Image: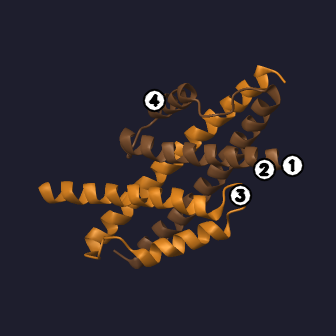
Chain colours: A brown, B orange
Amino acid sequence: MSNEQLDQLRAKLDQVNLEILDLINKRAELVQETGQVKEKQGANRSYDPVRERDMLNLILENNNGPFEDSTIIHLFKEIFKAGLELQEDDHSKALLV
Amino acid sequence: MSNEQLDQLRAKLDQVNLEILDLINKRAELVQETGQVKEKQGANRSYDPVRERDMLNLILENNNGPFEDSTIIHLFKEIFKAGLELQEDDHSKALLV
């Protein structure tokens, strides 16, 4: 077993990390856009537990592992929370304009 | 502003969620494979802070937002931790065989 094999796996991991980074930021942009649309509509922009549950259900229906559902739920809840915090920041900035 | 616009954004969010799910699980497979290679080499499989710092540096160099670096660090540390826990589980199962 060569170190070349480990180096290749690490290069693949770095590549996947950057792909995850891109998607997480793309998701953040969509969340910001959603917040702006809701703001214009005068809709409630705050945390929506029903929508979050629907998103999680769809994600879990498509989870083929190796991560357990519990791990996927934990990671996505962190991603959702970061998105909500970004929306809150945008809202605060909008109020200051 | 129509609800159609919100529905479209939500559909895009669901799509991006599933893409993130796929990549997170793909990353988990690579982590498992790395653990197996290290195991065969008799190398230390445990937490490697230098490698983790290198991965984070590369990720942050490529972070163009909207998420702040601090949020990206938080999310990836959770992803790294989940990967390590998966490796530990695999190791425990291997010892039981």
- Marks 2, 4 in one chain: yes
Mark 1 is on which residue type? Answer: Val
- Residue B79: mark: none
In the image, what residue type sits under mark 2?
A: Lys
Residue tagged 2: A93
Q: Which amino acid does label 4 sit on?
A: Glu
How far is mark 3 from mark 4, CA to CA?
Answer: 29 Å
Residue occupying image coordinates x 56% and y 38%: B18
Q: Can residue A7 be seen in this view?
A: no
Cβ–Cβ under 8 Å for marks 1 and 2: yes
Kindly state the secondary structure of the residue where label 4 is placed.
helix
Mark found first going from the N terminus, 2 or 4: 4
Chain under disc 2 = A
The answer as to whether the residues below labels 1 and 3 share one chain is: no
- Going by the image, does B15 lie left or right of A58? right
Q: Distance between the residues labelled 2 and 4?
A: 37 Å
Badge number at residue A61: 4
Residue B65, disc: 3
| Chain ID, mark 4 | A
Q: Which of marks 1 and 3 is in front?
A: 1
Q: Distance between the residues labelled 4 and 1?
A: 42 Å
Instruction: Read off the residue under disc 1.
Output: A97
Give the quarter of the image for residue A21: bottom right
Mark in the foreground, 4 or 1: 1
> Residue A14: x and y, percent?
55, 65
